[in-house]
Image: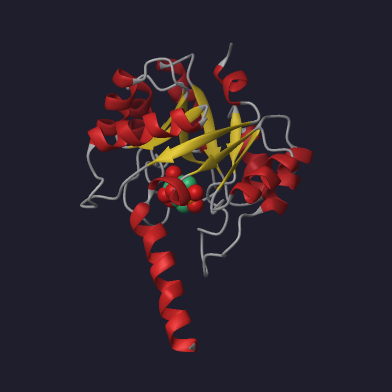
Amino acid sequence: MTVLDAIRGRLVVSCQADPGEPLDDPAHMVALARSALHGGAAGIRAQGLRDLRALRAALPDTPLIGLVKDGAEGVYITPTLAHAEAVAATGVQIVALDGTRRPRPDGLTLAETVAGLRRRHPRVLVMADVADAADGHAAVAAGVDLVGTTLSGYTGGAVPHDPDLELIGTLVATLPVPVVAEGRINTPDEAAAALHHGAHAVVVGTAITRPAVVTARFAAALVTSREMS
Ligand SMILES: CC(=O)N[C@H](C=O)[C@@H](O)[C@H](O)[C@H](O)COP(=O)(O)O
């Protein structure tokens, strides 16, 4: 079975911790990933070479989408060819990279990045994290294998509350490659809706693997409730 077949119609859980967070440790990421797989996830998305190596060693057969974040603004998801090659070298089946039309820090186009990556890693699949439909079309023209809605809402202005189901539907209707729903999918109903909009797979991160963020949402709701009573 191909890795795309393995995740078709299924949940992929993103296991990431920011530097300095209590969960920022490869052993914790492996435990989170094992928990996700126990719960029915078909694949894992993860960040950082250290975590990717640990996950690949612990879970050699699991579909793994890898990326490295370099900073937190602008083009920061696997921003350069060198980053993409380093991610591919960890043994992931899919390298996720910034697939927006913004200039890349190494001056390469997305097409040059994809071609360069394939020269050394001919079997790895490339997932373009895009922000809008025009990005999706440009990314497919650049040769990527799949497109994710990861960066919708994160390229300027306030971050929306809801997942971008409309973008998922638009990309599914117009692109010849699998579309992965990712970003702010916070409930099982939203995950199901993403699939209903035609997503090939659904990536959920924060709602499952960032307990500090989830706790803060509960705590904030209690503050609001106290203020209203
Ligand atoms: C925008 C960006 O940097 N997204 C990152 C990409 O890997 C992660 O921080 C997200 O957690 C991931 O996309 C999953 O999304 P959510 O955590 O909303 O389920």
Q: How many numbered marks have been drawn onto this rendered protein structure?
A: 0
The answer to whether 113 is drawn above or below residue 4 in the figure is: below
Residue 218 screen position, x and y as percent: 43, 66
Picture quarter with the N terminus: top right
Q: Nearer the viewer, residue 15 or 103?
A: 15
User: Which of the pair 212/218 is nearer the observer?
Assistant: 218
Residue occupying image coordinates x 39% and y 69%:
219
223 to 79, vertically: above or below: below
Residue 108 visible at all: no
Q: Quadrant of residue 144?
A: top right
Say left or right for 8 vs 32: right
Work out whether 119 lies above or below 166: above
Asked if residue 4 shows in the view, the reply is yes
Indicate the quadrant where residue 176 lies: top right
> Which residue is at a point 40% across and 16% down the rendered structure image?
120
**Which residue shows up at 41% across the image and 79% down it?**
223
Looking at the image, residue 81 sits to the left or right of residue 25; the answer is right
Q: Is residue 178 left or right of residue 125?
A: right
Please state the horizontal and vertical placement of residue 221, each as a whole percent of the image.
Answer: 46, 73
Residue furthest right in the image: 173
- Please say which color scheme the image uses: secondary structure
Residue 130, position in %: x, y?
57, 46
Residue 166 x %, y %: 72, 53
Task: Farthest residue to the top: give it.
Answer: 1
**x 30%, y 20%: residue:** 58
